[in-house]
Amino acid sequence: MTSTPAIRMERITKTFGTVTANDNINLTVWNGEIHALLGENGAGKSTLMNMLSGIYRPDSGFILIDGKQVNIASPKDAIKMGIGMIHQHFKLVDVMTAADNIIIGQKGKFLLSRKDAHQKIKEISERYGLEIDPAKKVYEMSVSEKQTLEIVKVLYRGARILIMDEPTAVLTPQEIQQLFRIIRNMKEQGCAVVIITHKLNEVMEISDRITVLRQGKSIDTIETKDVKVPTLIEMMVGRRVELKIKREEVAEKKALLNFSHVTVLDKEKHEMLNDVSFELKTSEILGIAGVAGSGQKELCEVICGLQQASGGNILFEGEDIVGKDPYEIYKLGIRMGFVPEDRLGMGLVASMDIVHNVVLKDYRMQKGVLLHRKSSIDKSKRIVESLEVLTPGITTPVRRLSGGNIQKVLLGREIDILPKVLITAYPVRGLDIGASFKIYDLLNDQKKNGVGIIFVGEDLDVLLDLCDRILILSGGKVTGLVNAQETTKEAIGYMMTVGLEEGFRAARTGGTA
Amino acid sequence: MIDFLTAAVVATMPLLFATLGEILTEKSGSLNLGVEGMMLMGAVFGFSTVYNTGNPFLALCAAFLAGAVGAFIFALITVTFQGNQVVTGLTLTIFGAGFSRFVGDHMIGSSVPRAAQDFFGKVKIPLLGDIPFVGQIFFRQDVFVYLGYIMVAVLSVYIYKTRPGLNMKAVGENTAAADASGIPVNLYKYLHIVAGGGLCGLGGAYLGIVSVPMWQEDVVTGRGWIAVALVILAGWNPIKALVGSFVFGALSILGLWQGSMGIHISQDIVNMFPYLATILIVIISTHKNRKEDRPPGNLSDPYFREER
């Protein structure tokens, strides 16, 4: 380590309206260090880093880069100072090639010379052990390829300080190991690396030091080797939290939903689900694992009647629901709860309050033209109370609630109809530890009541702890159906990439498969 | 037939300039529906300048500036003040129409001075003009038409082969990504909106000065709207814009020429063709599949860096 830190942020404060996102935060990062920034959602991690990358400007406090006080007014300034940020939502232009994405905004000759760019990209990728095809279009890339591209882009700009916002959120276990190799490689080359995450096991594995943020304040900075996971959680949450996800054991299980040879095509006639067969039982949580876009969305929607199967049968307690739209399924008396991935797009109407969102699910049961709000108001109150929804009131537009509370409203409404099947897609995505555990508890309660639950997830640790069985999808095909207690993360990670095109698969798994 | 196609090239030009202008605007991420208005502003200023000074070159500059000023207003409202682009563009169309009526009122029926008319007379390009058929149609035209060809070439190179062109596309496709890459996003938007408006102004001037060298109210007659549709048909590509404009130019004068070509359909029906074709394009274009043919990703989205 050198004597001047790569980054020094002192007494940084940033407010958005009445919300203080960062309150007097201090942070020091050295060259050749991997520094984890840990905290729950809304703790202010991304805000703090966005001030380094020139997206936000601090209200007060100052920033020193390599010992010199600087004013980072725009991303351009940040790039000039050697700061590169890889945002949680990739900032790439889909229709452009990798090379074009790398050179946009760079100084150079008026006429483009893509050959020179390709050459330089090749040099950089070889130096850091990255694999990238400069001529490939971004929309043809897998998530991990996009991430590699973001890393190359940052290095191409000569970044010595690398900030990664939740880089592992969408990667398979093998891809995460590959990413960690790259990060360690950069550390060896003397870069300063900041990783934002809330996955504790990853923090323990990769980081040298950890700074914990809570509710906009910096709690402490500690050496990773001196700390244990429970301590970190306590620092993040501010109290002791029981970490173990329970798996309720229910003895009696009956067949509930039966998929046989279901195929779903998209508009371009690609098979999004290909010959999928499985059975969901009562009192069961069935996990669905897979690389993003492997058919999870189609699986959920084909059950609800939002997409139509082009082949196969879906039997619900013996009744075939293929070819029926959601209203016809409803008329059959099949009670189904659906918590979609896109909560505010498909699940709830963001600008309406809790009551009216409840009405949306209820009004069919009512008689007459006019709405009867009374029962919906009662129901809303019940949801808010029993699920401990933090809201100014039941007439507050749901868009103003935090992510965890929005999810509670949605799940609460779906549970309230006493469903027989509950379909949940990424129900804890973006939720902090407390809210996530509340959701797991709710799902376990439903399971005990005999509900069959489909749980589409991305965190394999959670899937393994919570679910009874896990169905693995890869490219729309079922590549595995395993008992959660009898398998490993690596095995599932492998099944997630089975059958993918060889080169693609090698890139995704780093050749370890 | 050659005479008809030669006339079609003349009818192509206003559409071509306006389409190229709107391509620049949309490629950088803004949907300016004020094309019609900017064309009218360019037309009236171009005509007024040539009428008062007799200088055709000044007239072109004035027309470009008039369109650019209209576009600048649009940029100010939509980029700096984050106003709604559709509403602002429609307002600009209404504004341009009223403005041209107001400025041009006392000139109705006046003609472009003789010398300037001669300046925009047909010029044969050596060699190219001697190619049978093609040369006769495309290379025995006026200087304004050649300027149009040059613009197509210049913009094609600019968009696909230069660094600022690449940056501009990034701004239109994914503004946040462009910003994070250090591209001065608002500057790019302003420059391209304003330049695009200038080209629309030139398109209007062609109508006001060359097509009919005499001032009349509402010379543009909906060509601005056709240009907006042509941008989609052309897939935001300048060369396809030339082809599309030519087809529409030909359709728009078919009514006048059908008699001499021995076709006899009701004039009213023939006059509908360009607009019918416009509707068809919009329907067909919604079924395009290639990613590259789709509108820029952030078209008409306002951008504010700190939004969350």
Image (spheres, coloured by chain):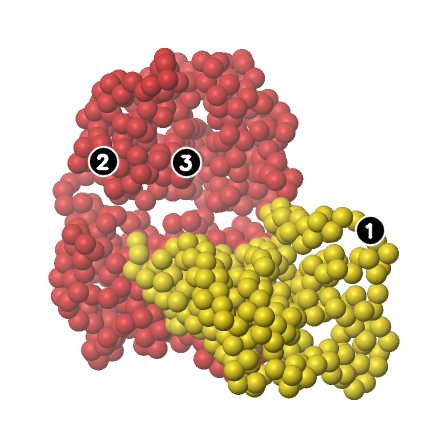
Chain colours: A red, B yellow
Of labels 1 and 2, the one closer to you? 1
Kind of residue at disc 2? Thr
Question: Mark 1, residues whose alpha carbon is within 10 Å: few (<14), some, or many (≥20)?
Answer: few
> Would you name the residue on which mark 3 appears?
A346
Please tell me the numbered disc located at residue B255. none
Tally the marks: 3
Please tell me the numbered disc located at residue B264. 1
Kind of residue at disc 1? His
User: Which residue shows up at 64% across the image and 78% down it?
Assistant: B144
For the C terminus of chain B, the image quarter is bottom left
Measuring from the top left, give residue B244's x and y in whole percent: 68, 61
Q: In front here: A477 or A77?
A: A77
> Would you name the residue on which mark 2 appears?
A396
User: Which residue shows up at 28% across the image and 57% down it?
Assistant: A46
Question: Mark 2, residues whose alpha carbon is within 10 Å: few (<14), some, or many (≥20)?
Answer: some
The image quadrant of residue B102 is bottom left
Q: In front here: A451 or A13?
A: A13
* CB contact under 8 Å: marks 1 and 2: no
Question: Mark 3, residues whose alpha carbon is within 10 Å: few (<14), some, or many (≥20)?
Answer: few
Q: Check the residue under mark 1 and report the chain it is in.
A: B
Q: In front here: B166 or A72?
A: B166
Kind of residue at disc 3? Met
Measuring from the top left, give residue A58's x and y in whole percent: 20, 65
Left or right: A509 in relation to A253: right
